[in-house]
Image (cartoon, coloured by chain):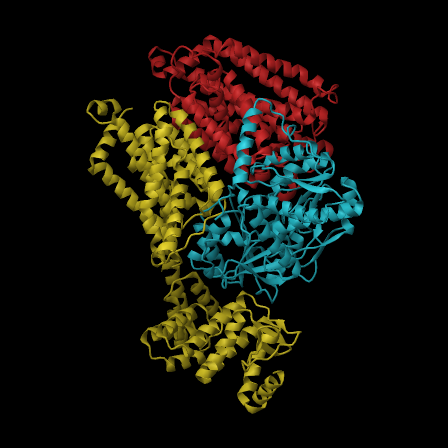
Amino acid sequence: MMGGGMLFRVIALSLAALTIALPILGGPLAGSGIGISPYLANIIGQIATFALLAIALDLIWGFAGVLSLGHGLFFALGGYLIAMHMLKDGYVNAGVVPDLMTFMGWTELPGYWAFFESFPYAAVLILVLPGLLAFAYGWISFRSRVSGVSFAIITQALTYVAMLLMFRNDTGFGGNNGMTGFVSLLGMPMGAPSTAVWLATASTAAALGAFLLCGRLVRSPFGRMLIAVRDDEARLRFLGYDPVWPKLAAWTLSGVMAAIAGALYAPQVGIINPRLLSPEVSIEIAVWVALGGRGTLSGAVIGAVVISALKFWLTGFAPDLWPFILSLLVLIVVVGLPNGLTDLRLPKLKGARHGG
Amino acid sequence: MTLGLTRRRLLKTAGASLLGVGAASFPMPGLIRSARAADTVKLGCLFSSSGAMANVEGRLTSVVRMAAEELNAKGGVMGRTVEVVGTDPASDWPLYAQLSRQLIEQDQVAALFGCWTSVSRKSVLPVVEQSDALLYYPLHFEGEENSKNVVYLNSPPSSSVLPAVEYLMGPDGGEAKRFFMLGSDYVWPRTINQQLKGYWASKGIPETDWREEYVPVGHSNFQTLVNQIREFADQPGGQPVVVLTVVGNSIPDFFREFANQGISALDVPVLGLDALEADFEGLDTAALAGHLNCWAYLQTAKGPANDAFKAAWAKHVADTGVPYRGDVAIDPMVSVYDGVHLWALAAEKAGSFAVPEVRAASPSVSFACPSGYEIAMMADSTYVKRGVFIGSLNETQGFDVLWQSEGTPDPLPFSPYMKA
Amino acid sequence: MPVIRLLILLAALFGSPAYADRAVLSGALCAPALADQIAALGALAEAGATGGKDEAAWARTVVEAVDARALRCAASLAFIGEGDAALDAASLAPSPAPVDAAPMPINNRLRAAAASAAAALTLFVDTEPAARAKAATTLERRREALSLTILDAALAAETEPTVLAVLEPLRARMMLADPDPQNRIRAIDAIAAETTLRNRTLIAEALSEEADTTVQAAGQAAMARIDRQIAIGQVLATLYSGLSYASVLLLAALGLAIIFGLMGVINLAQGEFIMIGAYAAWFVQNAIRALLPGLIDWYLIIALPISFLVAALVGVVMEALVLRRLYNRPLMTLLATWAVSLLLINLVRVTIGTQNLEFHQPFYVVGGVPVVGDFIVTLNRLFAIAIAALAFVGVVLLLRVTTFGMNVRAVAQNRAMAGAAGIDARQTDRLAIALGSGLAGLAGVALAPLYNVNPNMGAGFIVDSFMVVVLGGVGSLAGAVAASFGIGQINVIMEPLYGAVAAKVVVLLLVIAFIQRRPEGLFAPKGRR
């Protein structure tokens, strides 16, 4: 069921190796032949956050059968929270006035920006706010048994609503321009090579942590419960289990992981804006998971890494081709490889995979 | 209709796709790019050829290529051939930052030409500042920014919008008294409207004589807003004007509704600050004649420099088969064209491609812009001084020059009207 | 040659007193102040009206030159045209303009006055009654250069009843400043016959300087009448906006509802089918323009069946290549249809380009018809409403009356039982997909006069149309209609109060909240799946 212990171990080991090697190859050895440039480290770091995001979605989609087309919401939430911290920190401690204050003609930031200069406060919010949001939304939806396609569409609508709101400048989050011009994070100046390397290391470490945690979870009794929910929710109810709670726990955890990914992503790209909330971004996350293969965790990582690396490379090199390659890849995999790219490597697994 | 797929291009794309699949497992962006000989100098482009901005942004890369060809035809810059590196940021703002980093660090470009929207510029800004690179930015924009790493080729509101509004308020412009500001909700319209309000307040115009409304970017249903504009316009108090700062596809949608509801430019003129000839393709412009726009270049500008530019563009489109109209020239195209030439002149003057030297030499060179003005960078900022045109829409989807500035007004990076 | 020209000029100059008058009249246009220039246009119109047909024709030529921005001024001498090709505005004889002759600056207020003067002069020049009637209607709106003298002259000369029917009330309206209070009251009533806010402002401005109490009373009554009509007009305008928005939603959602209701498949490429329908209409337009230019005004109607078929074909191909293999995996079809949409967008992008397509706008989708108050029925929206209504009625009939419709309903209610009863469920699916896609194609034609047509146009409909389908209830056509109207109307009512964004946000949140309470939507499906 777990998509082959072998593959799982290979990916875990690669992530661990990257986490250890990055600070060395990007630090003392940066200039040498085997060194990693800050530019490459930055890309590795971004891809690692995508992998983390894909793991988060696979937990809820691959194992609990709940497709979210709105994981961009949690991802963006994490990104916005860390961006608010960096802007406020730059404003308070370095005297850099955020752009959004200039063009809105504000002399001070709105009340809800209070305390954001403190990193611990922001860090707690990054864990708590998305968790609360996911819990509240999941609690309402799962109890009223909204599921399947309806759930997917509604998560997308919710993300779309958030995008419309964030595009508004009155809401005080920078509108379409979002937030940019970060000064430093935890005392590390933005743009310094060492910062890029450390952020990348943190990202691979986070991806590794999430990978191992979810790997354990899905093998536990809780994980079997999730799979039971996915495969036949009605029967589970008959048997006297309440499927709401396992679903809700996985959903909340998934939201928090996505937010952590966002919080690691925003400092690495140096900008956060409402585009992360657009429907395409959220669908693309689902595409990573579907391409890699759902319900294996390994597939999610492979999908995220392969597609985003391909995208990075092609948009610079053969920009016109990228959408064609992506769409054809999706069609081939969806039609021909029901379990994603992992089908290419693994013998067919026993047991039918239900639903979609 | 150009199909855009010539045989050569097809072969190129096919080859690229093979490479793309082959290299998928080794994500090393830029490393694969072949090393070029040392006798070239590279210019990087950051204009989207896909996504929401593709319609207008894509053609600017072709203009940069055209300008580079002109330079190369004269022997290059300081004996080096100019090579243009194009990218597609796909209207995805973080990708602009990503690709600019790639162009600077991997391709070692001498200068960047790019960005249309303010948000994409803001996204690239930290990158160029960190590596002390130079970005030539071709769009008129909201100002309130002055980075030594950006050459602002086009005008901030102080030297484009304010002169235009001043003209409309004067006797020649029709003595506008009341203003309806309608914009897409983002930084450019917001900043402009804020400066306008400050300006009007300084002229003693009461707050009741203006109204401000915003719609989301990409908004298309303007029924309610056009009703509101009619209501505003039909009230007493003097000549009303609409200051329109909606962008992109909202522009034709707005004008279509405006005309269909039977409001004439003769009663309520619209000053469409981002309106271009291309926005009126497919609209019945007979019902829209007399609406206004305001740019640093209009296609109908008179002079040999403009004739030469338009001819060169038509030829470039015909020669390369790029899918753009050869008979349409818009302001940002001219701005980016000016940018390439200003960069080349400054580099020659400095005798170096190093950014600090080029920047230092920039204020001392000038270029005969197709708009008919001799343009140059300011000495105390990186803003380029441009002329101002007000265009009046005619029946054939073009803009006639209604008014143009005497010389090139000094752009003010920071508006005195912001804190009103 | 210049010598001859000079002789002509001298002869004209000294030979005819009319020349001197004309030189003064046209030269007045060169005054520096805008008010004087507008007055000069009025004077020109008056001179033409009272000076006979030749004078009127001359005046019209000069006025049209102003509008065409051909007038140049050297001191107080006006020329038409540039340099050596210029004409003396007074004699219309060739006369090179001095090098320092500057083009007369023109703005929209001058152009309005010029249009007014040109219309007034047309009443005296044109022999076509239709042209004179058109000019008279223009004068109703543009009175900048109109005076009582002109109107009285026109009324005296006019014999055509259609023209008189416009001019007589117009004369009444011109009496707003008349010394006789009765005439002022008549003027107010004539103005109030058209109940627009603009006319209300006219009356209000007149009343602010009115001393006579009977006129005041009549004015107040007229304004109250207009206020009532405007209020009615506002309600109707809101309803109409809501209706037109609802029809757009319904057009986009109808096909989606059929496919979703039957197969539980959400087609994320539905927006792109709309785009394909619009592009098909564009090709139809180009074909008609090339082959049957006489029918060009009717291309939108001709495109209806063609766009339906083209989009249906694309839908069938998608079903055969992709969806067929994905039944029972609805979430995977979601991703597959997304990939199809990405593919379609980019195919169109590289083959045709990203620019907005140019559509010829036939008369039945241009402009609007004023109804009451400031309420105008815009024709392009009416066109979309009509197509939406037709499409809906057609679909209902198809599903109620035909065997195919019966099959669809049977399969939707219970797929297994329908199969057992001998219905080929797969065949029904294929036909239903064709129908659903074809309806999106129809939507493309209906929306072409309303929206910009480009490769990305479909993306704008995705979220909205899903909300309609989900809110309406799976597979319920009545639900889709109710949901479209609800969403459209609430949106339009909220928009002026809180702005377009807030309206959309609130509506979406309401729908999401509603779904949480009633996951089956407004109209619960009868069958089981």
Chain identifier matching the cyan colour in the rendered picture = B
Chain C colour? yellow
User: x%, y% of residue C28?
Assistant: 58, 78
> Above or below — where is C129 with respect to C456?
below
Q: Nearer the viewer, residue B21 or A91?
A: B21
Quarter of the figure with the N terminus of chain C = bottom right
User: Colour in which chain A is shown?
Assistant: red
Q: Is residue C522 visible?
A: no
Front-lying residue, A303 or B387: A303
**Quadrant of image for the C terminus of chain C:** top left
The residue at the point 37 percent across, 49 percent down is: C284
Up-down relation of residue A98 to residue A46 (above or below): below
Q: Position of residue B50 (x, y in %)?
A: 53, 39
Q: Quadrant of residue C11?
A: bottom right
Total numbered badges shown on the rendered structure: 0
Q: Position of residue B334 (x, y in %)?
A: 63, 51
In this rendering, the answer to whether A298 lies above or below C9 is: above
In percent of width and height, residue A271 lies at 62, 33
Q: At x 76% / y 41%, what residue is drawn?
A: B353
Left or right, A221 with respect to C291, comes to: right
- Front one among C456 and B409: C456
Residue B12 shows in this picture = yes
